[in-house]
Image (cartoon, coloured by chain):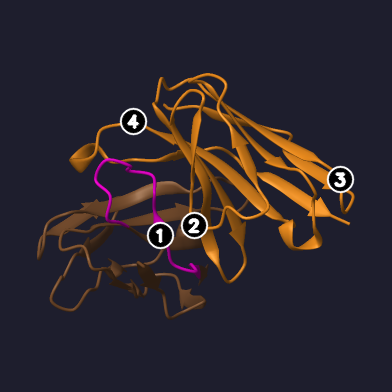
Amino acid sequence: GDSVTQTEGLVTLTEGLPVMLNCTYQTIYSNPFLFWYVQHLNESPRLLLKSFTDNKRTEHQGFHATLHKSSSSFHLQKSSAQLSDSALYYCALSDRTQVVGQLTFGRGTRLQVYA
Amino acid sequence: EAAVTQSPRSKVAVTGGKVTLSCHQTNNHDYMYWYRQDTGHGLRLIHYSYVADSTEKGDIPDGYKASRPSQENFSLILELASLSQTAVYFCASSSGTGGTNTEVFFGKGTRLTVV
């Protein structure tokens, strides 16, 4: 079945430094949909980014990611971390275009930004 | 914005007891989902439904039942609660269309503790 790997469980950064959270995936489906969800403390997960197109950069709220099918990757990046970016970030995969919420999530990466 | 409401927000249940978690959405979405969240495992799909009076198994359905009596309501039922079912449960909804309109809206979660 599908799988999503997020290698870092915890990333700690000083405010102003760049952010990179890793995400790789495995699926037999040739056209996967990749997502980043963010969950702030005591809140529900919400969609941050999504991509369906190979080698096309997608951006939202200062974050960006590019789906690379050649390396099965969808890393999340931001040029300068802010204190408010501290949250749990999930990479997720869908290979079922009709059941959009049937997602396979990674284990999540907690980002902690310090002043 | 889409609204998914879960009740109760937290619950303590006794091992072997029956637990029902409820979810109500006002988005007019066809699809509803139940996910569980565990540290180190991320979010995993338990059951989903795309129409009233019908439910489908997700990735980890064992020990859970689901009920969709109407488009707006979706319940998760633990007939015999076990310690291993201690987790945070999220209900979610999405439209039935795939492709670029893909977005899943999550509720605020129910923290279930089985003792």
Name the residue that disc number 3 marks: B17
**Chain the render paints orange:** B
Q: Is residue A26 or residue B56 the one in the foreground?
A: B56
- Residue B38, given in percent of the width and then of the height, sits at 62, 63
Q: In the image, what residue type sits under mark 4? A: Ser
Q: In the shown orientation, is residue A45 left or right of residue B19?
A: left
The secondary structure that most of the magenta stretch takes on is loop
Q: In the shown orientation, is residue A36 left or right of residue B101?
A: right
SS type, badge 2 = loop
Depth-wise, is mark 3 or mark 4 nearer the camera? 3
Neighbour tally class for label 4: few under 14, some 14-19, many 20 plus, Cα within 10 Å: many
Q: Is residue B49 or residue A44 the one in the foreground?
A: B49
Question: Which numbered disc covers residue A104?
Answer: 1
Quarter of the figure with residue B39: bottom right
- Which residue occupies 40% across, 59% down? A104
Which comes sooner in the sequence, label 3 or label 4?
A: 3
Which comes sooner in the sequence, label 2 or label 3?
A: 3
- Residue B24, given in percent of the width and then of the height, sits at 57, 25
Please determine if labels 3 and 1 lie on a single subunit. Answer: no
Question: Which numbered disc covers residue B110?
Answer: none
In the image, which residues are magenta? A94-110
What chain letter is assigned to the residue under label 4?
B
Name the residue that disc number 2 marks: B59
